Amino acid sequence: MKVEYEKISPDTGSSFRLIHWKSENDRYFWHYHPEYEIVFVRKGSGKLHIGEHLKNYEEGELVFIGPDLPHTGFGYGVIGEHEEIVVQLRKDFLGEEFMQKPELQHIRELFERAKQGLSFQGKARKIVAAKLQKMLTLSHFERLVELLNIFHTLATTNEFSVLNAAEKRFDFNHKDEDRINRVYEYVEQNYQKSIDIQAVADLANLTVPSFCRYFKKISHITYTDFVNEYRINQACRLLFENKPIADICFEVGFNNISHFNKTFKQLKGVSPREYKANSNQ
């Protein structure tokens, strides 16, 4: 559970990185990196946080995330099987001058839009999804050619939505990491009991009002919302293990079932009982 700068290196013999990722219930990973990132969710659904944009995503989600745009991992809070295909690359991955070629004007414009975060739909998404899956079986040279075709598809479609305002820029640097990591680790270790906001503020060396403002600025959600979301994701894991709902409520730190049920439905869209029934199908 860290706010991190993610260090990314190209694959050996390649100018970019291609990842086929499978996971279950990843940790909270609020991070940023100077690379552009394409993510295709091959299996799974959940909640995604990109910049200031919060959204629920479904299987088949395709996003293009620009450099230094903070985001969570797609696997956070997912129960059961989750699978992604991810491409990560620098803007100059083919050299400083490559993107300046006249044939690539529309791709330069795509890269500029991606700084706000883009989500793709429709026919374009299906085409790119198929190409990403194909890339897993190709040689390094063939992958590069296919990637350029993917950029062409993404750059020439209007089947996309922009996730953050153009004027929004995120001040996200290493000096905040130690402070916010202490807070996240405290939640991870103490979510099962009542969390004292004064104790958490002390960890950050701030007053309570200053801490609340600071946390909202860094994570773009309130501290209370973060704690509730973490607790509910732990509850989902326990429901998947078929534990009784009443026991789970208190095990994850809620002190009454009514509040637990209300918060669960707000975050997951269904009641704990419905979620449990769906997980057993």
Image: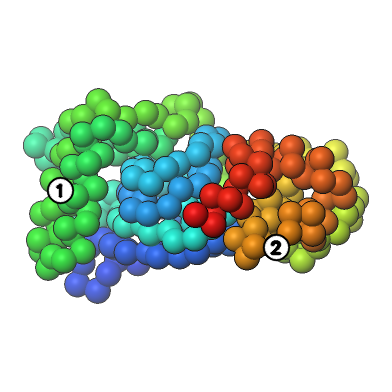
Number of marks drawn: 2
Placement of the N terminus among the 4 image quadrants = bottom right
Q: Report whether residue 237 is seen.
A: no
Q: Nearer the viewer, residue 192 or 250?
A: 250
Disc nearest the viewer among 2 and 1:
2
Amino acid type of the residue tagged 1 in the rendering: Leu
Q: Give the secondary structure at mark 1.
A: helix
Looking at the picture, how far across and down is residue 226, in whole percent?
Answer: 70, 46
Q: Which residue is mark 2?
A: 243
Residue 34: numbered disc? none
Rendered residue at 47%/26% (across/down):
165
Looking at the picture, how far across and down is residue 111, in whole percent?
Answer: 29, 39
Amino acid type of the residue tagged 2 in the rendering: Lys
* Image quadrant assignment for residue 17: bottom left
Q: Nearer the viewer, residue 91 or 182?
A: 182
Image-based side of 193 in relation to 121, left or right = right
Rendered residue at 13%/45% (across/down):
149
Q: Which residue is mark 1?
A: 148
Image-based side of 70 in relation to 256, left or right = left
Rendered residue at 35%/67% (across/down):
9
Asked if residue 164 is positioned above or below residue 22 in the image, the reply reads above
Per the model, the C-alpha gap separating discs 2 and 1 is 48 Å
* Image quadrant assignment for residue 214: top right
Q: Give the secondary structure at mark 2.
A: loop
Rendered residue at 81%/40% (across/down):
258
Looking at the picture, how far across and down is residue 267, in whole percent?
Answer: 63, 40
Q: Nearer the viewer, residue 38 or 208?
A: 38
**Residue at the outermost bottom position:** 12
Looking at the picture, how far across and down is residue 144, in whole percent?
Answer: 15, 57
Image-based side of 168 in relation to 65, left or right = right
Q: Specify how the rendered protein is coloured.
A: rainbow
